[in-house]
Image: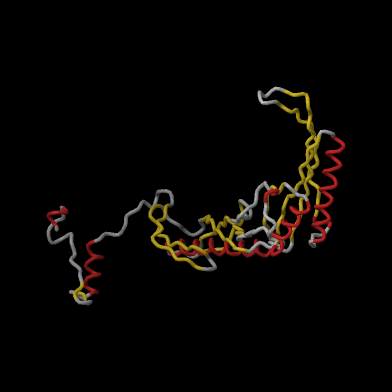
Amino acid sequence: MESQLGFVPGDAVVRLGVQRGKARADPVRQRVAVVARVPAPSGDPAAPLRALIFDSIFDTYRGAVPYFRVVDGSLKIGDRIRLIGSGKVTLTPDIAYVTIGVHTEGKDASQAVSENNSQTQAVIDALEKSDIASEDIQTTNFSIYPQQQLDDRGQPTGEITYIVNNSVYITVRDLESIGDVLNVAVEAGANQISGIQFDISDAEYALAEAQEMAVANAQAQAENLAQASNLVLGDIQNISTFGGATPYLKYDGIGGGAAVMEAASVPVSSGQMIISVEVSVIYEIR
């Protein structure tokens, strides 16, 4: 082995092994032999601080906790270190926002508007009968515009069609009923559903928990770094959050084309929402 790898025979290689579950040599003498022959990692104390992450564990509260070894530079009493901690909380959404619209067309502007008004009012009445409170129904768009008709060659025919759109933004507070609500809206005349957004009605407690976890994660990192330098972690000098809480989720969304929905209840999956927080914490070494 020495000749194949280029080692000095009898000096660079420490033979270790097991046989039938037992070490061939005294394990203590084996460790001493390794320590005596393998030099400690070298570094430059005058260089900028660099640390090697040689291991990590996962704690359900503090998150991923890395273990450091200072390679270059040094930590001394009075120095300050800045750590970034992260925390996240997974929640199940309990509220949804949906935009429901009515699209009509007609040769006469007044007739097209009248038809759209009647159809939209029917949708609103149906939503209120489905336990959607009136304060949770808000008109967000009403538009009317003329559209020139074209022939097969793309040339204007002189005929004009008036396009009318009316959209309402609704809040659904019972997610178990959202499929039925969409079905009722479609049956009442809605022919545009632009999307569904899920949210948490009261996310303050989850945000506070994520912030607490992020601080604990930064604290664990700082403690390990100070321990690696044989120093004691001092008081927090500064703490700040950045990036804010970032909620994100996965769900089976519903796009346009509501007019082709079946009469059965629309299947909707709310998925889960994750609130993520990052904090920057500065500690003093003492």
Q: Residue at x 79, y 31 (%)?
A: 146
Q: Is 140 or 36 nearer to us in this picture?
A: 140
Q: Can residue 238 be seen from the camera position used here?
A: no
Residue 221 drawn at (x, y percent): 49, 61
Q: Is 260 or 90 nearer to us in this picture?
A: 260
Q: Can residue 5 be seen from the camera position used here?
A: yes
Q: Is 266 or 231 nearer to us in this picture?
A: 266
Residue 82 drawn at (x, y percent): 53, 55
Q: Residue at x 80, y 54 (%)?
A: 137
Residue 33 drawn at (x, y percent): 21, 67
Q: Is 113 or 82 nearer to us in this picture?
A: 113
Q: Residue at x 74, y 62 (%)?
A: 173
Q: Is residue 79 left or right of residue 115?
A: left
Q: Is residue 67 placed above or below 244 in the rendered structure?
A: below
Q: Is residue 68 left or right of residue 136?
A: left
Residue 71 drawn at (x, y percent): 38, 55
